[in-house]
Amino acid sequence: MPILAVVFFFKTRDIELQVPVSYLYLAMLFSFFGDVLLMFMDQGEIWFSTGLAAFLLAQVFYSITYRHFRYEKSNVSGKAIKMVYSLIIIAYAVILWINLYPHLGDMLLPVTLYTLTILVMVIMAISRDNRTSRLSFYLVFSGAVIFLISDSMIAINKFMVPVPYERLLVISTYMIAQFLIISGLAEHSILKQGEA
């Protein structure tokens, strides 16, 4: 995450940002904390719980960031496609939660809260459709979906069944997700500066 923060800084360093970029850096900071904490989750539940809390805060700050990294209005509503995307994501999250539910035990509330939070994060990414460039939208949207899939693998592996090559799959998808999100937000900043 520090590397991606540096990448975003250098990609936008010559741009007079019109949005509160601090939310994005907070999202990356809490993602970094979550990375570190989850590295030790095999040492006890406290590591997993605090890592989950860190990522929950990261998702909150990403959701706020998406609200600012978009145009206020669009000439094209695109409500139908947003609804379709949102329903697919909601259906995925509900099916995953239903399958996880019998295995969660004391982690029911934390996992449910996190599921709702990351769901909001993805839906906020969807809300950027037709309110930024196509490239920026699809980079951030793809990153958000891959983030959801990456976290799903962690949950399935921890609470349900072992996922083959889980560590490799989680790390690779997580890094791809973060890279796409940061690249998409930088793209929006560059586009907005060009139109100023």
Image: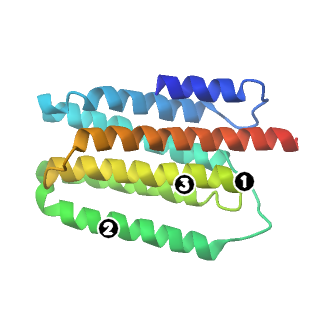
Regarding mark 2 in the picture, which secondary structure is present there? helix
As drawn, 71 above or below 43: below
- Ranked by sequence position, the earlier of labels 3 and 2 is 2
Q: CA distance from mark 3 to mark 2?
A: 19 Å
Q: Position of residue 57 (x, y in %)?
A: 42, 39
In front: 105, or 132?
132
Q: Does residue 32 appear left or right of residue 128 in this picture?
A: left
Classify residue 17 by image quadrant.
top right
Q: Position of residue 12 (x, y in %)?
A: 71, 29
Image disc number at residue 94:
2
Classify residue 175 by image quadrant.
top left
- Circle nearer the viewer, 3 or 2: 3
Q: Which residue lies under the disc numbered 1?
A: 133
Q: Does residue 29 appear left or right of residue 191 in this picture?
A: left
Identified by mark 3, the residue type is Phe
- Please rate how many residues cluster around mark 2, counting C-alpha atoms within 10 Å: few if below 14, some from 14 to 19, many from 20: some
As drawn, 96 above or below 78: above
Regarding mark 1 in the picture, which secondary structure is present there? loop
Q: Position of residue 40 (x, y in %)?
A: 20, 27
Q: Which residue lies under the disc numbered 3?
A: 141
- Ranked by sequence position, the earlier of labels 1 and 2 is 2
Regarding mark 3 in the picture, which secondary structure is present there? helix
Quadrant where the C terminus sits is top right
Image disc number at residue 185:
none
Identified by mark 2, the residue type is Val
As drawn, 87 above or below 49: below
